Image: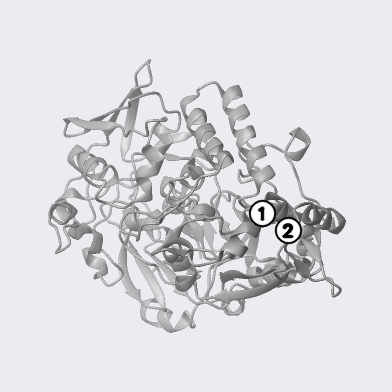
């Protein structure tokens, strides 16, 4: 589902490619008790990690269905559209934004939604340093990294005052508005460690009925490792032109499973209403469209990225290096990373793993973005070239023994562990090929898929890893990924600074090119001349491809199969088939 919530979290770490949806135990077992209720049954890769939006860093998550912000971005036109705010005004100097809320807004418990909720959401949560949320990164403005101030004008009007012009600000106000009448007390209360009690509230163990929301749906039920059920929010503000309340579909069901083959079986048997098309399923499903009474939507590159990356963190915890010093020297050698990039045969990966349904990827910015820099305009690429890879390694002081094994200048065998999340056949196939490809330049790669929870803990908390295969979602506005590229950002995964509440790191270093990318992102956010914005983002892409903090792999085609019993599908590669869930109708 597409919403500004998804747009804002566009660079949240994915457990699997966004095109891959999954099924769980037979959905028909659930349908027997709710067969008469109009519903859409789809699927997700794994259980939600939290129902507390500011603390969420992962996908899948429920927030795109249960919350809205002041505005949204239409995925088809790219234009900013009203949501909770019916209108806004911007001062000539672009330092003041005044939002007027729609009249009569209510929370899912029937309580009024007012300017007090907007004030609470931003001032007491997003801008509160005691709340460790990545949302704050996107609102830090300029070199000073100052936050906007906010004040209430009346019950329906709020004003933001910016320290300096900030081009992405309007889009960023699509972040969810949260209920002050329910959460304020938890922000004010402190636990035994002096932290807000809010940090331990609205976890996945919270009864769904206690989660107060403002989106088209509310949580009805959550069964661990089985399903998440959403019920239509009767107090949702939107109505159609005839005055009928939206959304029309009463219930949504997300089945949960960790096996992609099961999703295919469930969809083909009619247990699922929609499924993301992975390359290995496309040929089978394409010939069954008519027989199975479904349609496959989409045939263009997806908006996410896939890549491998090395742990470049030179820091120490408790006097112990996060990365073994010998391996850290390899990873922080530019020629080493460039050699790896040249040694990965991406076209073979496209042909075999993606069955031809993909394109080589070379940029952190999605190809649909007006700021994307194509190779023909100056973006460096790394086409498969084993000779070039070996030349770079030798230039950097590496050498080969009589068995063609790669050694560093001190005679250490080049061997490292490549992690990814288990259960995703596509990603596991990619990792297996990378292992084979790098063996051709003498590297021994121990490819190790592990459980998602363990994986994310290593990447974002313990920082105990060497190399990883991962993916990020993408969007039209590059600044959505600012917390990936700011050196102190919460998703600066290749050289992660400890986040609030985590153990400190001694000796953390920022390379000059890292600092330069962060500086360029600040400049691009300050610039309103579109031509200059494109130039700034072009330079960031050139720096990332030269220095390779992420070695990009393949951009698969985004496709989704949907049963023919739905009216109102308006597919977008950026946001899928059900981004406009509020106007989808069941016709059969």
The x, y position of residue 69, in whole percent, is: 34, 43
Tag 1–tag 2 contact (CB < 8 Å):
yes
Report x, y in % for residue 236: 29, 50
**In the rendered image, the vertical position of residue 403 relative to residue 164, given as above or below:** below
**Image quadrant of residue 328?**
bottom right
Q: Which residue is mark 1?
A: 551
Left or right: 572 in relation to 142: right
Which colouring convention does the figure follow? one colour
- Asked whether the viewer can see residue 287, the reply is no
Quarter of the image for residue 520 reads: top right
Lower position in the chain sequence, tag 1 or tag 2: 2
Describe the element under mark 2 as helix, strand or loop.
Answer: helix
Q: Residue furthest top?
A: 92
Q: CA distance from mark 1 to mark 2?
A: 8 Å
Q: Which of these two is toward me, 143 or 565?
A: 143
Query: Does 522 appear above or below 485?
Result: above
Count neighbours of disc 1 (C-alpha within 10 A) and say few if under 14, some if 14 to 19, many if 20 or more: many
Count residues near mark 2 (Cα–Cα under 10 Å), then give few for <14, some for 14-19, many for 20+.
Answer: many
- Which of label 1 and label 2 is nearer to you? 2
Q: Position of residue 197 (x, y in %)?
A: 18, 60
Mark 2 sits on what residue? Answer: 340
């Amino acid at each position: 589902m597409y919403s500004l919530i998804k747009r804002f979290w566009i660079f949240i770490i994915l457990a699997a490619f966004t095109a891959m949806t999954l099924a769980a135990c037979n959905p028909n077992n659930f349908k027997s008790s709710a067969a008469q209720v109009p519903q859409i049954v789809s699927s997700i890769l794994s259980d939600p990690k939290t129902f507390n939006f500011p603390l969420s860093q992962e996908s899948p998550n429920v927030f795109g269905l249960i919350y809205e912000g002041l505005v949204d971005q239409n995925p088809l036109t790219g234009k900013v559209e009203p949501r909770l705010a019916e209108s806004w005004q911007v001062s000539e100097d672009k330092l003041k934004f005044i939002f007027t809320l729609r009249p009569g807004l209510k929370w899912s418990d029937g309580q009024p939604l007012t300017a007090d909720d907007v004030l609470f959401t931003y001032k007491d949560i997003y801008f509160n340093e005691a709340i460790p949320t990545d949302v704050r990164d996107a609102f830090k403005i300029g070199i000073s990294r100052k936050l906007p101030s906010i004040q209430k004008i009346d019950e329906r009007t709020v004003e933001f005052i910016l320290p300096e012009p900030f081009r992405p600000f309007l889009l960023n106000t699509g972040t969810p508005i949260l209920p002050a009448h329910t959460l304020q007390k938890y922000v004010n209360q402190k636990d035994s460690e002096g932290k807000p009690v809010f940090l331990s509230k609205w976890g996945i163990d919270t009864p769904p009925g206690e989660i107060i929301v403002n989106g088209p749906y509310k949580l009805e039920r959550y069964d661990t490792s089985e399903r998440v059920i959403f019920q239509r929010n009767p107090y949702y503000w939107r109505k159609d032109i005839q005055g009928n309340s939206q959304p029309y579909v009463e219930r949504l069901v997300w089945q949960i499973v960790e096996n992609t083959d099961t999703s295919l079986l469930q969809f083909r048997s009619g247990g699922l209403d929609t499924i993301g098309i992975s390359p290995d399923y496309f040929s089978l499903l394409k010939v069954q469209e008519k027989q199975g009474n479904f349609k496959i939507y989409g045939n263009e590159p997806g908006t996410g990225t896939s890549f491998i990356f090395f742990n470049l963190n030179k820091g120490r915890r408790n006097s112990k290096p996060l990365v073994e010093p010998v391996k850290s020297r390899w990873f922080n050698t530019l020629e080493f990373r460039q050699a790896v990039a040249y040694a990965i045969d991406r076209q073979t990966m496209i042909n075999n793993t993606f069955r031809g349904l993909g394109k080589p990827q070379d940029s952190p910015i999605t190809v649909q973005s007006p700021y994307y820099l194509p190779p023909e305009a100056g973006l460096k690429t790394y086409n498969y070239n084993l000779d070039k890879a070996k030349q770079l390694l030798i230039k950097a002081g590496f050498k080969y023994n009589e068995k063609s094994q790669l050694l560093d200048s001190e005679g250490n065998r080049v061997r490292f562990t490549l992690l990814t999340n288990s259960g995703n056949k596509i990603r596991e196939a990619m990792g297996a090929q990378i292992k084979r490809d790098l063996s051709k330049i003498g590297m021994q790669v121990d490819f190790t898929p592990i459980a998602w929870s363990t994986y994310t803990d290593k990447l974002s908390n313990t920082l105990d890893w060497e190399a990883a295969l991962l993916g990020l979602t993408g969007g039209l506005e590059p600044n959505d990924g600012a917390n990936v590229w700011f050196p102190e950002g919460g998703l600066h995964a290749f050289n992660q600074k400890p986040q609030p509440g985590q153990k400190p790191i001694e000796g953390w270093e920022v390379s000059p090119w890292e600092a330069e990318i962060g500086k360029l992102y600040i400049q691009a956010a300050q610039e309103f001349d579109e031509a200059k914005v494109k130039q700034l983002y072009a330079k960031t892409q050139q720096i990332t491809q030269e220095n390779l903090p992420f070695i990009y792999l393949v951009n698969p085609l985004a496709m989704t199969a949907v049963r023919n019993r739905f009216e109102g599908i308006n597919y977008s590669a950026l946001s899928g088939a059900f981004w406009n869930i509020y106007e989808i109708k069941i016709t059969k």
